[in-house]
Image (cartoon, rainbow, N blue to C red):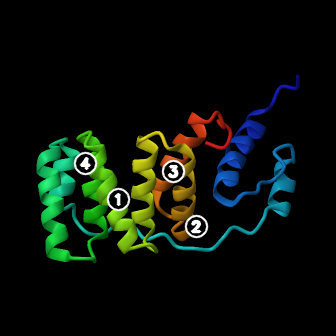
Amino acid sequence: MKKLSGIHLVMMILCAGMIAATGSCLNAQTQPSQATENAPTPAKHTCMVRSTPMSAGDIALAHTDYAKAIDAYTSEISVAGTDASRAHNGLIRALLAANRISEAEAAAKTWAATSPKDAWSMASLGEVELRQGKIPEAFATLQSALATDSCNPQTRADLARIYKLTGMFATA
């Protein structure tokens, strides 16, 4: 068995990430000078960084006060109406953290039905499906969410969990 040098090992790790993100990768055995010349053009997109302060629900969830977080997110949703993507996502994550899976599923399905093009709604539904052990359904839902918004870190983390659960360690 051939022993890999440090640069080859780093390239293999980066390659696994590129496969997960783009579906293709450089040959991990190419030399560094060849890698630059033969590299595929990366997709050009800009990911937005959240610039608003944490809400009361976010703070309660961070402090593992799930009941308070659920109440705060429910209040935010009633005030903001349908334009409460972060509050819906927070509510579902708080319900999951409180182990109220059936309520999280109902909230995620309702939100996904009313906002089918919202990547966060699909990601939340995928997270619920993953938590329920519905791996194929979760994978399909999370792939749809990733196709809609490739910048969602929670979607990528959940997909990595699925890859790990299914033994696809190199892809994770």
> Do callouts 4 and 1 mark residues in contact (Cβ within 8 Å)?
no
Which of discs 2 and 3 lies nearer the camera? The answer is 3
Look at the image and tell me in which quarter the C terminus lies.
Answer: top right
Q: CA distance from mark 4 to mark 1?
A: 10 Å
Q: CA distance from mark 4 to mark 3?
A: 18 Å
Whole-percent x, y for residue 122 in the image: 45, 62
Q: Is residue 115 above or below residue 71?
A: below
For image coordinates 39% across by 57% down, the residue present is 124
The Cα atoms of the two marked residues, 4 and 2, are separated by 26 Å
The residue under label 2 is 147
Q: How many marks?
A: 4
Q: Secondary structure at mark 1?
A: helix
Location of mark 4 (residue): 95
Q: Earlier in the sequence, mark 2 or mark 3?
A: 3
Q: Mark 1, mark 2: which one is toward the viewer?
A: 1
Earlier in the chain: of badge 1 and badge 3, it is 1
Q: Are marks 4 and 3 in contact (CB under 8 Å)?
A: no
Q: Which mark is residue 108?
A: 1
Q: CA distance from mark 2 to mark 3?
A: 14 Å
Residue closest to the eye, 37 or 131 = 131
Image-based side of 25 in relation to 137, left or right: right
Q: Earlier in the sequence, mark 4 or mark 1?
A: 4
Rendered location of residue 54, percent (x, y): 21, 60
